[in-house]
Amino acid sequence: MEREQIIETLLLWNFWEKDIDAGIRREGYLTRIKRYLDTDEIVTLTGVRRSGKSTILLQIIAQLIKNNIPRTNTLYVNFEDPRFYNFLNIDLLDEIWQVYCDYLRPEGKVYLVLDEIQKITGWETWARSKYDRKENVKIFVTGSNAELLSSEFANILTGRHLQLSITPLSFAEFLKFKDMEIEPDRLWLVKNKNALKDFALEYLQLGGFPKIVLTKDELLRKELLSQYFTDIITRDIVNRHKVKDVGKLENLALFYSTNFTRTYSFNKIKKVIDFSVSLDSIHRFSHYLKDAFLIDFVPRFSYSLKDQMQTGRKVYFVDNGMHNAIAFKFSQDKGKLLENAVFHHLKRQKKEVYYFHEKQEVDFICKQGLEIVELINVCYNLGDKETLLRETSGLLEAMRYFKLKESKIIIAEGEGKKITAEGFDIQIIPFYQWALD
């Protein structure tokens, strides 16, 4: 690629001669990244495509410039720019860096962002060399594949990187995107209860992809989400793993989207799906989908690791809005959407999550160290006695099993309250309240 072409491309993406709109700030992530700025480690941002990784790093650059870092000391490279398409190799990375240094002549520390770096084979060796030579450059990289930014380069960058997982919007972030500022007191929660209930129901349907939340046209939202799904399948799985049976991969992804929150083993999936695919392909494709952040699995809790591995796992989907856009369904899936949202909230909190099933099931149990510390059931509403009895009896069984005195039921409709039974306390909490605590 010609040097002039490289600098022309970089000019489009960088702050050198203009301000770039970096969107709505996601303060939680920005605060964590700011803590990393004075370290030498390479910062890696992982997460599903379109979750906001690039935007967050643009926000970091904008903040650095606001804090009087020279514009020319920042370099943002988007490896998905089509101008780079025919030149994606380690030589391009070298050439970009040299062209930048020759044209901009930065003095002092450079802040370098390599966006969607998985396009460049060997990038980790290049980044490590700059780290080991103690060059005056702070490197940030993003990628849309968990395998790429964990196991594959762990040996090369061991002890040299800090990793941050970026997800679609939390409920608190969703409220900010809806121009609602959260205040940290109970009075504010009470005064805004009705609005928060409405926003929570909207969040459960729309999901949390940033652009989708800001898009008002319902048909356009569905088209965008369908395209996100296609891009994840094509760019982050098919192209990366050279998958030939693309139709079967996509059908399996649609199966998971349609049947999210249910319990499956790979053997069971092979028996129930209505298309022909080998057990080995189900296993491989499922891990590809997980590494691309499209699905996640929750194992059944057992004190025996062997039992955990041999029983079915519950599957969760990346985003409620994407589920609504692509899944084959005959109902609104309200209860499943709530359970999926609860799972992702627990995951953002870095909880070690399982489900529990003895005589009855509990949706989520959270483990901390060697101890089970939290039991959670999820139910859209508790409008009839039979539903309430089912949800509470499962929790009572689990509380006796784990010798815990408290548990929770997260609801979407209804009021919060506490139930005491057999000396145990069950807290019923509306989702909007629980997700903001």
Image: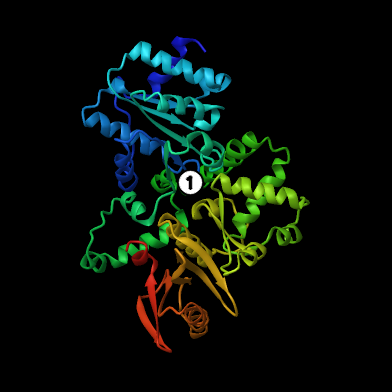
> How many other residues sit within 10 Å of disc 1, few (<14), some (14-19) or many (≥20)?
many
Position of 97 with respect to 66 (left or right) is: right
Under tag 1, what secondary structure? Answer: helix
Coordinates of residue 420 in the picture (x, y in percent): 38, 86
Residue name at image x 29 percent, y 32 percent:
62
Q: Is residue 57 above or below residue 348?
A: above
Coordinates of residue 95 in the picture (x, y in percent): 47, 15
Q: Nearer the viewer, residue 199 or 31?
A: 31
Position of 274 with respect to 347 (left or right) is: right
Coordinates of residue 369 in the picture (x, y in percent): 44, 63
Labels in figure, total: 1
Residue name at image x 50 percent, y 44 percent:
48
Display coloring: rainbow
Residue at the farthest bottom position: 422
Q: Is residue 36 above or below residue 168?
A: above
Q: Is residue 180 above or below residue 108?
A: below
Whether residue 206 is visible to the viewer of this picture, yes or no, is yes
Q: Quadrant of the C terminus?
A: bottom left
Q: Nearer the viewer, residue 281 or 432?
A: 281
Residue name at image x 78 percent, y 51 percent:
276
Position of 143 with respect to 20 (left or right) is: right
Going by the numbered disc 1, the residue's amino acid type is Arg
Q: Quadrant of residue 175?
A: bottom left
The residue that mark 1 highlights is 221
Coordinates of residue 59 in the picture (x, y in percent): 32, 36
Position of 63 with respect to 332 (left or right) is: left
Whether residue 80 is visible to the viewer of this picture, yes or no, is no
Q: Quadrant of residue 267?
A: bottom right
Q: Nearer the viewer, residue 1 or 125?
A: 125
